[in-house]
Image: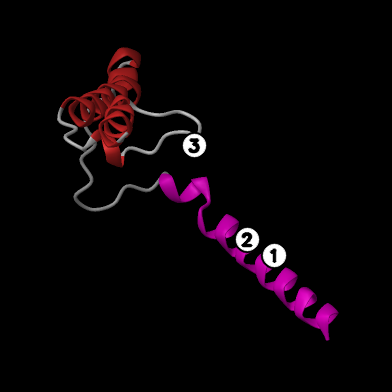
Amino acid sequence: MDKKNALRAGALAAGTTLMMLLMSSPALALTRDDGDDPGTGLSVVETLGLYVLAPIVLFVVIAGLIMVLDRSHPDHRVTSPNIRTKAAKQKAGAKA
């Protein structure tokens, strides 16, 4: 029974892959659609700026804002079990 399911899954995957390859033929890209009005292409610098530099800058800005605006209490931060934070040491000293 297990071989039958594996064979069915393999046939389905092969059929799906074949259909995707046939339907996405590059020859279909040669005919223009109605209303198709492509603009000018991007230069290498514009492409790198848009798809590489812009996401990196956005990531750095968001990460920086999160670090600067972090208002979590030091006692709630997760640390290694054998490392005590300053706040934990002060509490332990005050209790003793």
Which numbered disc covers residue 81?
A: 3
Whether 95 is among the magenta residues is no
Classify residue 70 as left or right of residue 41.
Answer: left
In the rendered structure, which segment of residues is drawn in magenta?
Answer: 1-29
Question: Three-letter amino acid code at disc 2?
Answer: Thr
Question: Three-letter amino acid code at disc 3?
Answer: Pro
Residue denoted by label 1: 14
Which circle, 3 or 2, is nearer the viewer? 3
Q: For the residue carrying disc 1, how many other residues have a C-alpha within 10 Å: few (<14), some (14-19), or many (20+)?
A: few
Q: In the current view of this chain or complex, which residue is farthest to the front?
A: 96
Classify residue 92 as left or right of residue 67.
Answer: right
- Disc 3 to disc 1, how far (Cα)? 51 Å
Residue denoted by label 2: 17
Question: Residue 96's x, y, as percent?
Answer: 32, 33
- Disc 2 to disc 1, how far (Cα)? 5 Å
Q: For the residue carrying disc 3, how many other residues have a C-alpha within 10 Å: few (<14), some (14-19), or many (20+)?
A: few
Residue at point 76% right, 80% down?
A: 5
Check if mark 2's residue and mark 1's residue have beta carbons within 8 Å: yes
Question: Residue 79's x, y, as percent?
Answer: 42, 34
Check if mark 3's residue and mark 2's residue have beta carbons within 8 Å: no
Q: Which of 25 and 66 lies nearest the eye of the viewer? A: 66
Q: Which of 54 and 17 lies nearest the eye of the viewer? A: 54
Disc on the earlier residue, 3 or 2: 2
Q: For the residue carrying disc 2, how many other residues have a C-alpha within 10 Å: few (<14), some (14-19), or many (20+)?
A: few
Q: How is the image coloured?
A: secondary structure
Q: Secondary structure at mark 3?
A: loop
Residue at point 79% right, 75% down?
A: 7
Q: Quadrant of residue 11?
A: bottom right
